């Protein structure tokens, strides 16, 4: 993987997990942005605390790196409850989930990341556990198999998914509250950066913070990562002060462009324009053209490109907008998606 690609990938890599843990807000009032989600969640949690009951199960959906894991930890901290963490791909068999559910303590928060990737038998076991705090342990095989019901302690499930649309309806319906996490705006990312720079001991003037925030793809994880790379650059090439010009030079070096597009984003747009005349083209064809998995293009690149108004999803396939042509320094054809249909002024 190239340096540029790693830098703006929204997934955490290597030592980053340790640094992320140190930078995570621990309580709801430290959590920046997502105002609506914060307010809704605060009500859910406080009313549960008043009733002295575990709150409803919570589903969080949104792109990688927006703070879903952080919020799950905050939920447990606000409830004063222990937290158990697992992920959909780790739950291959019903027994994997039964082992966790049967050892939960009362009120514990169970966080399942990537819940849409859980295997079917585990998913079915989860329905009953969420609704009735019960699991059926199947003993034996074939016609002689019997299900032994086992009560489990009332718990709160917090599920996270980058693809809410892939969750089967019976699972989605069992969550009492769904938090839709959106990309952060530049102002919110500036606050994330100021907070992180204080924790990391980096001197970050406002204009430097703004420049990094603008290029962070609306994602706190990327903002924190760019901050560290810009800090390295500032220490080696300057006096450590992260000014706007310095941030801009550092991020140019790392191939993060002025709108925060990374190599994959530019490859997707470049293929769309260069190979398919702006589209429409199907997701898998586009993914093959850039040498990536369709899921990577769909989950990592597309949501940001759509949000930036550079790509549109249409019933006939992916289409580059007029703004995409302009972003890559090209002249959009008159029939480009989103082009102004009026003739130019004489
Ligand atoms: N609202 C926020 N305020 C401050 N920092 C945040 C916020 N949201 C996320 N972060 C920072 O971004 C990093 C990534 O967040 P987190 O791991 O919670 O994302 P995620 O959505 O769970 O990602 P993934 O789905 O890829 O695991 C954390 O280190 C955290 O410090």
Image (tube, rainbow, N blue to C red):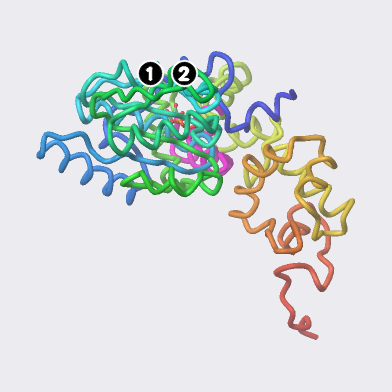
Which residue is at the far bottom? Answer: 346
Q: Residue at point 70% right, 63% down?
A: 314
Q: Tell me where residue 193 sits by quadrant.
A: top left
Q: Are marks 1 and 2 in contact (CB under 8 Å)?
A: yes
Residue that mark 2 sits on? 96
Q: What residue is rendered at 21% in x and 46% in y? A: 43
Taken as a whole, is the magenta stretch helix, strand or loop?
helix
Give the label on residue 100, or none: 1
What quarter of the picture does the C terminus occupy?
bottom right
Q: Position of residue 272 (x, y in %)?
A: 81, 52
Could you tell me which residue is drawn at 39 percent across and 39 percent down? 191
In the rendered structure, does residue 33 fall within the stretch colored magenta?
no
Left or right: 54 in relation to 5: left
Q: CA distance from mark 1 to mark 2?
A: 7 Å
Residue 238 or 164: which is nearer the viewer?
A: 164
User: Few, some or many C-alpha atoms within 10 Å of disc 2 (few <14, some 14-19, many ≥20)?
Assistant: few
């Amino acid at each position: 993987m190239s340096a540029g690609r790693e830098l703006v990938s929204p997934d955490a890599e290597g030592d980053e997990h340790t640094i992320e843990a140190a930078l995570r807000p621990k309580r709801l009032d430290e959590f920046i942005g997502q105002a609506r989600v914060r307010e809704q969640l605060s009500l859910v949690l406080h009313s549960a605390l008043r009733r002295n009951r575990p709150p409803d199960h919570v589903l969080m959906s949104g792109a990688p790196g927006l703070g879903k894991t952080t919020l799950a930890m905050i939920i447990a901290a606000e409830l004063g409850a222990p937290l158990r963490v697992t992920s959909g791909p780790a739950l291959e068999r019903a027994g994997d989930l039964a082992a966790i559910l049967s050892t939960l303590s009362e009120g514990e928060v169970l966080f399942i990341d990537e819940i849409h990737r859980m295997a079917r038998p585990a998913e079915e076991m989860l329905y009953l556990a969420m609704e009735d705090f019960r699991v059926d342990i199947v003993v034996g095989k074939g016609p002689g198999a019997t299900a032994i019901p086992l009560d489990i302690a009332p718990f709160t499930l917090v599920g996270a998914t980058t693809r809410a649309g892939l969750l089967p309806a019976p699972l989605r319906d069992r969550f009492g509250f769904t938090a839709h996490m959106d990309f952060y705006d530049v102002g919110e990312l500036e606050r994330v950066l100021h907070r992180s720079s204080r924790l990391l001991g980096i001197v970050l003037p406002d204009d430097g913070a703004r420049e990094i925030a603008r290029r962070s793809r609306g994602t706190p994880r990327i903002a924190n990562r760019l901050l560290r790379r810009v800090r390295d650059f500032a220490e080696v090439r300057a006096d450590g002060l992260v000014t706007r010009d310095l941030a801009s030079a550092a991020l140019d070096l790392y191939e993060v462009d002025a709108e925060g597009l990374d190599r994959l984003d530019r490859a997707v747009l470049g293929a769309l324009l260069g190979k398919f005349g702006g589209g429409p083209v199907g997701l898998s064809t586009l993914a093959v053209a850039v040498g990536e998995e369709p899921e990577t293009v769909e989950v990592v690149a597309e949501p940001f490109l759509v949000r930036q108004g550079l790509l549109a999803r249409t019933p006939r396939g992916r289409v580059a907008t007029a703004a995409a042509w302009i972003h890559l320094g090209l002249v959009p054809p008159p029939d480009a998606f989103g082009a102004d249909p009026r003739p130019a002024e004489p």
